[in-house]
Image (cartoon, rainbow, N blue to C red):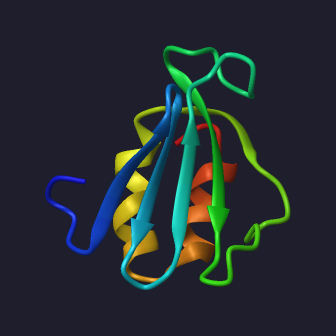
Amino acid sequence: MEGIINVTKNNIRAGLTQYACANGWTLSVSTNPMTYSDGKTTCEIAIFDPQDNYYTGDVFAYVDIHKVDVVLPFLAGGHADIVADILNDKDQ
């Protein structure tokens, strides 16, 4: 991701991108309308810890796509709790 240190963007397949942080955390972003996404302005996001487990036990549905840029610096800094708080707040 441009401007964020130690984050690698991996296009897994059409509609699925993973942002792998050097600290082991991963943000998985789906824009496939067959998931919890409208395919345009919202996405489905999952947070994976360094052991590749779901951090919150589930995905975040219909998240504004612009939140990806907001939460990546926090995840790169190891603050998954802040990322989850931001993604849970639909009004931000």
In the rendered image, the residue lying farthest to the front is 13
Rendered residue at 40%/72% (across/down): 21
Front-most of 38 and 11?
Answer: 11
Taking the image as shown, residue 5 lies to the left or right of residue 28, namely left
37 is higher (above) or lower (below) than 89: above
Taking the image as shown, residue 6 lies to the left or right of residue 49, namely left
Rendered residue at 57%/56% (across/down): 86
Q: Could you tell me residue 42's position as x and y percent? A: 56, 25
Instruction: Report how many numbered discs are placed on residues in the image.
Output: 0
Front-most of 7 and 69?
Answer: 7
Q: Could you tell me residue 58's position as x and y percent? A: 83, 55
In the rendered image, the residue lying farthest to the right is 57
Rendered residue at 20%/72% (across/down): 5
49 is higher (above) or lower (below) than 91: below
Residue 34 in which image quadrant: top right
Q: Could you tell me residue 68's position as x and y percent? A: 43, 46
Taking the image as shown, residue 80 lies to the left or right of residue 69, namely right
Rendered residue at 26%/75% (across/down): 6
Taking the image as shown, residue 70 lies to the left or right of residue 81, namely left
Residue 76 in which image quadrant: bottom left
The quadrant of the image that shows the N terminus is bottom left
Front-most of 73 and 12?
Answer: 12
